[in-house]
């Protein structure tokens, strides 16, 4: 990982004047962020070309990619130009991909504005769009030059988006012993903005460390997919938010790992208590556990699978330890249905 992450209330003032000076700048944001923060755009990007995309995952697609790239060409950006992605994970993923493609790569600065994008998507250089209903299937590894994380953006975040970010934060508890203890001690307090803010720093540090050791996900970076195989399958089948789906994924995969003897029982129970506390926060989305088998089918298309027969999951094993669990597709479906029945 080459970029530098700046975190704190003063990071925009500290970095943006220097980063925006002396070349044509291009800003990508979405309609909600643009409407919420007019003064921010006036203050830092008065002379820049600003592209305001529609908000939402359904716009992380080829149509938006083409429109943004055409606007970049029209703006006459040069190799020295810089793209600033100001928004949640959708804007960050789209912006990073556009920066990687324009003139074979221009500098990109990520300014994440959701909890999820601050703790996860802005760091690590994964960029992508969804194609033919398959999530993140076309993309590139492209590291941002800098990531500027200002916690003030989180003040306007609705509860649904807060919970979305928590889904990824809880994931880190499964990877690091100290992080796990902090989360376990504070599990009744997960909606506290103060707690979440202190966890943003630890989350970013943890993710950046993993990415520096394994940028292209050939080994250790797979740990960041804890809960995600089943989470993505649930997201597709039941339309829950990404974060809440990841929480469900962590819950069911931890139960599967405990049932197969891969995850220590006592530790697994404590991890489940953290996940349950996060799941109980509003808004509580519903999934039909009787139909969980339908979600199992979606897991067959997961990018982590190496063949069509086995479902690959990154699961918690013991405090600060994780492992890969691979189950034959039929066994995965049975295990998932059993884990859901024990609800
Ligand atoms: N690249 C990665 O490593 C990585 C990791 C995890 C997730 N992702 C991707 O991230 C995306 C999800 O990101 P997300 O949850 O940030 O979704 P998002 O970008 O859709 O943002 C969620 C909503 O919050 C709004 N919003 C943004 N900032 C706001 C603010 N400060 N105040 C109020 N509203 C605000 C947005 O307009 C949007 O409606 C998915 O596409 C997922 O695939 C990428």
Image: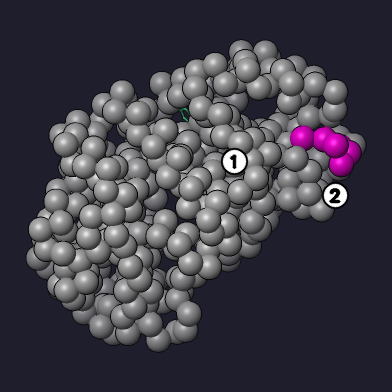
Residue 108, placed above or below residue 239? above
Which residue is nearer to you in this view: 24 or 324? 324
Q: Quick check: is the Cβ at mark 1 less than 8 Å away from ligand 1?
A: yes
Residue 108 percent location from the top left of the image: 70, 39
Pointer 2 residue: 103
What residue appears at the point 31 percent right and 62 percent down from the top-left corner?
A: 322
Which residue is nearer to you in this view: 15 or 319? 319
What residue appears at the point 16 percent right and 68 percent down from the top-left corner?
A: 258
**Range covered by the magenta-colored residues:** 77-82
User: In the figure, is residue 76 to the left or right of 296?
Assistant: right
Cα distance, mark 2 to mark 1? 20 Å
What residue appears at the point 16 percent right and 74 percent down from the top-left corner?
A: 261
Mark positioned earlier in the residue sequence (2 or 1) = 1
Which residue is nearer to you in this view: 117 or 8? 8
Which quadrant would residue 27 be assigned to in this image? top right
What residue appears at the point 38 percent right and 74 percent down from the top-left corner?
A: 312
Residue 51 percent location from the top left of the image: 71, 33
Pointer 1 residue: 91
Q: Quadrant of the C terminus?
A: bottom left
């Amino acid at each position: 990982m080459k970029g530098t992450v700046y975190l704190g209330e003063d990071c925009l003032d500290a970095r943006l004047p220097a980063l925006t000076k002396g070349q044509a700048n291009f800003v990508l944001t979405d309609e909600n962020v643009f409407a919420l923060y007019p003064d921010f755009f006036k203050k830092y990007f008065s002379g820049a070309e600003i592209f305001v995309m529609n908000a939402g995952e359904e716009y992380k697609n080829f149509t938006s990619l083409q429109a943004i790239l055409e606007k970049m060409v029209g703006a006459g950006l040069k190799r020295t130009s810089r793209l600033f992605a100001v928004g949640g994970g959708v804007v960050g993923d789209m912006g990073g991909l556009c920066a990687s493609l324009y003139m074979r790569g221009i500098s990109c600065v990520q300014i994440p504005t959701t909890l999820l994008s601050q703790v996860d998507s802005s760091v690590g250089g994964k960029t992508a769009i969804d194609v033919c209903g398959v999530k993140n299937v076309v993309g590139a590894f492209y590291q941002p030059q800098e990531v500027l994380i200002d916690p003030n953006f989180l003040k306007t975040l609705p509860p649904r988006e807060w919970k979305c970010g928590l889904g990824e934060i809880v994931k880190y508890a499964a990877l690091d012993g100290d992080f796990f203890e902090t989360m376990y001690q504070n599990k009744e307090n997960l909606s506290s903005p103060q707690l979440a803010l202190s966890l943003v720093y630890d989350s970013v540090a943890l993710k950046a460390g993993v990415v520096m050791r394994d940028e292209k996900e050939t080994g250790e970076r797979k740990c960041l997919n804890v809960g995600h195989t089943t989470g993505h399958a649930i997201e597709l089948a039941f339309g829950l938010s990404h974060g809440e789906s990841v929480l469900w994924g962590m819950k069911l995969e931890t139960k599967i790992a405990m049932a197969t003897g891969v995850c220590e029982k006592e530790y697994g129970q404590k991890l489940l208590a953290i996940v349950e506390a996060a799941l109980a926060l509003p808004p509580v989305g519903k999934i039909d556990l009787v139909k969980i088998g339908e979600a199992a089918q979606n897991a067959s298309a997961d990018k982590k699978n190496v063949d069509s027969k086995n479902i690959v999951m990154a699961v918690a094993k013991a405090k600060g330890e994780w492992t890969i669990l691979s189950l034959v597709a039929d066994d995965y479906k049975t295990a998932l249905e059993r884990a859901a029945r024990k609800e």
